[in-house]
Amino acid sequence: MRGRDEETGEFFSPSRSQNRREALEVLALGEKLVALTEAQLAKLPVPDSLLPHIREAKRITAHIAHKRQLAFLAKQMRREDDEVLEAIRDALDEDGEAARREVAAMHRVEAWRERLLADGDAALAQLLDEYPTADRQHLRALVRSALDERRKNKPPRAFRELYRALRELIVGGTTGDDDVEDADESIEDDER
């Protein structure tokens, strides 16, 4: 049914431009899905009917063929209900937001570590004002050990331990091996 309603003057269906914008949004969503790993895909509410098309788009590396497969994936996605696509978008946004919060927390911890190493007791006093439950003696010992390690060019054991203690204090969670490895990588970058 095309045209306008004679009484209200409104269009019966969306314009071609609106349809094109919506199709491009679905294509962009398909590109995001193709960029995800299998583990990340498993966490999303992606219908089983779309998974083979996503895997096929990942497998194809030739530029034009990949583009054609993405277009086909978008076509298959447009056949799904809007609620399904919205659920996928929401899940992707939540994952992205969680990752951004995690990175921000890591940067906050690293900034405190650098402040403690650069400013010493003054920075420790500021940290204790913000986090009164912190163990002053333990943190001070870790800062001194980390500075001593830097001076003697020893492996950064206390540096890492200071990161763990600050992360426990600021974030409130236990650090995983990934966080320690990230901290270790930033240490190696600093030392170069």
Image (spheres, rainbow, N blue to C red):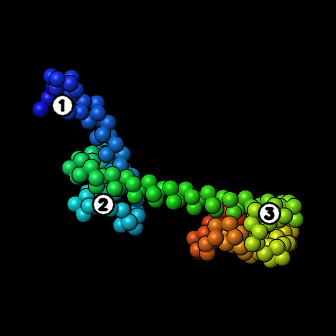
Secondary structure of residue under mark 2? loop
Local crowd size for mark 2, using a 10 Å CA cut-off: few (<14), some (14–19), many (≥20): some
Q: Which residue is mark 3?
A: 129
Instruction: Tell which of 6 and 39 is nearer to you.
Output: 6
Residue 131 has which mark? none
Q: Nearer the viewer, mark 2 or mark 1?
A: 1
User: Is 72 on the left or on the right of 121, as rendered?
Assistant: left
Q: Residue at x 18, y 31 (%)?
A: 12
Label 2 – label 1 distance at C-alpha = 31 Å
Q: Nearer the viewer, mark 2 or mark 3?
A: 3
In the depicted structure, whether residue 70 falls above or below residue 120 = above
Amino acid type for the residue under numbered disc 1:
Phe
Amino acid type for the residue under numbered disc 3:
Asp
Q: Which residue is mark 2?
A: 46
User: Is 163 on the left or on the right of 128, as rendered?
Assistant: left
The tag earlier along the polypeptide, 2 or 3, is: 2
Q: Which residue is mark 1?
A: 12
Query: In what quadrant of the picture does the C terminus appear?
Result: bottom right
